C-alpha cells in the first residue's frame, strides 16, 4: 500500500511539473532578450495603416526593417524585460493612426516616455555618466547633468519646487523653474537675459546670437510657430521640423524619413 501511494504521489508531481493544466503556468518569455523584444516592437509598429502609408511591400518587410532599427536603439547588454511591455504598448499606440506627434516621436525614435526604462546600465548610483542608459533606468535611475556640464551622475531625480535648493546631485527643478546653481528660480519670460535654454519659459529658447556684451548671455526668444521655416526640431514650438517647416505632427507617407525604418 505504501509503495502504491508513493507511485501515485510521484505521478501526480510529474504531471504538475510537466506544464499541464494543474501545474504552474509557463512564464511569458516573448520579451526575454533584445532580439525577442525587437520582434514584438516591430509587430506593434507595422500595422496595416503604417504599411499602407509607407508604401511598404508587405507587413513582413516592414517588420524586418523595424526589427533592425530597434536593435540599433536598444542595447543587448543590460536590456531588461521588467518594464518592456509598457514600451511595446506605447509603440503600438504611437503608430496606431500612422501619425506621430513630438511625444510619440520621442518614444519610437529616442526611447523616450514609457520606453525609457529598458536598460540596466553599468554605472551605479553616484557614478559619472553621460547619457541615461549609462545608469539603471529599469529602477528609475538616470543621468542627471547639471546646466553647463557635459557629464553628470546616476541618480533617481528628486523634483524641487520654486525657491527650493537644487545644488544636490539628484536635485532637479520642476518644469516651471530652472536651477541657478543653488536654488530653483522661476523661468524667464521672452525678452529676458539668459545663458541657456532651461532658463526660459516653455516654448522659448535662449538666443545667444543676441549677445552684444560678449559675456555669453542671450535673450529668451519664442520658438518658431507652425509653418515657419526651420532647420531642426528644437527651432519649433511644436518640437517638429519637417521638410524645413515647423509642423504639429508627422503623417507617415512614402517620403517621410520615419518610413525609412519601416
Image (cartoon, rainbow, N blue to C red):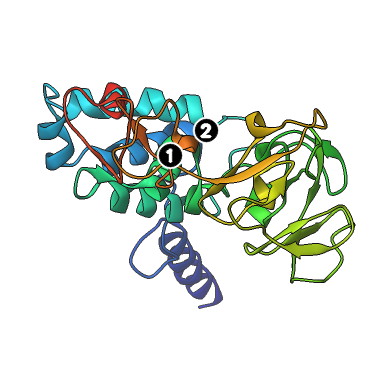
* Quarter of the figure with the C terminus: top left
Q: Position of residue 200 (x, y in %)?
A: 63, 52
Of residues 162 and 123, the one drawn nearer to the viewer in this rendering: 162
Q: Is residue 209 above or below residue 103?
A: above
Between the residue at mark 2 and the residue at mark 1, the CA separation in whole angstroms equals 9 Å
Q: Position of residue 28 (x, y in %)?
A: 42, 53
Residue at 33% across / 67% down in the picture?
A: 21
Q: Secondary structure at mark 2?
A: loop
Q: Position of residue 45 (x, y in %)?
A: 28, 40
Q: Earlier in the sequence, mark 2 or mark 1?
A: 1
Of residues 48 and 212, the one drawn nearer to the viewer in this rendering: 212
Q: Position of residue 58 (x, y in %)?
A: 12, 26
Q: Pointer 2 and pointer 1: residues touching (CB < 8 Å)?
A: yes
Residue at 11% across / 21% down in the picture?
A: 57
Q: How many marks?
A: 2
Horizontally, residue 32 falls left or right of residue 137, namely: left
Tell me if residue 27 can be seen.
no
Residue 153: quadrant of the picture: top right
Of residues 1 and 47, the one drawn nearer to the viewer in this rendering: 47
Horizontally, residue 20 falls left or right of residue 31, namely: left
* Mark number, residue 12: none
Residue at 40% across / 34% down in the picture?
A: 38
Residue at 17% across / 30% down in the picture?
A: 253
Tell me if residue 183 can be seen.
yes
User: Which residue does the numbered mark 1 point to in the structure image?
Assistant: 37
Q: Residues within 10 Å of mark 1 (few under 14, many from 20)?
A: many
Residue 149: quadrant of the picture: top right
User: Which residue does the numbered mark 2 point to in the structure image?
Assistant: 74
Q: Secondary structure at mark 1?
A: helix
Q: Residues within 10 Å of mark 2 (few under 14, many from 20)?
A: many
Amino acid at each position: 500500500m505504501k509503495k502504491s501511494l508513493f507511485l501515485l504521489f510521484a505521478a501526480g508531481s510529474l504531471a504538475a511539473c510537466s506544464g499541464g493544466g494543474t501545474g504552474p503556468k509557463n512564464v511569458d518569455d516573448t520579451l526575454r532578450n533584445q532580439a525577442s523584444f525587437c520582434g514584438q516592437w516591430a509587430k506593434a509598429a507595422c500595422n496595416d495603416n503604417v504599411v499602407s502609408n509607407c508604401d511598404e511591400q508587405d507587413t513582413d518587410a516592414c517588420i524586418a526593417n523595424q526589427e533592425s532599427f530597434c536593435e540599433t536603439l536598444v542595447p543587448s547588454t543590460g536590456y531588461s524585460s521588467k518594464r518592456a511591455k509598457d514600451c511595446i504598448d506605447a509603440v503600438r499606440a504611437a503608430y496606431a493612426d500612422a501619425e506621430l506627434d513630438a511625444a510619440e516621436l520621442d518614444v519610437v525614435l529616442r526611447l523616450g516616455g514609457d520606453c525609457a526604462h529598458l536598460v540596466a546600465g553599468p554605472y551605479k548610483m553616484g557614478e559619472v555618466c553621460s547619457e541615461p542608459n549609462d545608469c539603471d533606468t529599469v529602477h528609475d535611475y538616470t543621468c542627471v547633468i547639471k546646466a553647463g556640464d557635459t557629464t553628470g551622475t546616476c541618480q533617481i531625480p528628486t523634483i524641487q519646487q520654486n525657491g527650493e535648493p537644487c545644488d544636490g546631485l539628484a536635485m532637479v527643478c520642476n518644469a516651471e523653474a530652472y536651477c541657478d546653481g543653488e536654488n530653483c528660480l522661476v523661468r524667464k519670460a521672452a525678452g529676458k537675459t539668459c545663458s541657456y535654454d532651461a532658463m526660459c519659459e516653455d516654448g522659448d529658447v535662449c538666443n545667444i546670437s543676441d549677445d552684444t556684451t560678449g559675456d555669453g548671455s542671450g535673450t529668451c526668444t519664442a520658438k518658431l510657430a507652425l509653418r515657419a521655416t526651420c532647420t531642426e526640431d528644437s527651432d519649433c514650438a511644436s518640437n517638429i521640423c519637417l521638410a524645413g517647416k515647423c509642423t504639429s505632427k508627422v503623417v507617415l507617407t512614402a517620403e517621410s524619413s520615419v518610413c525609412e525604418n519601416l
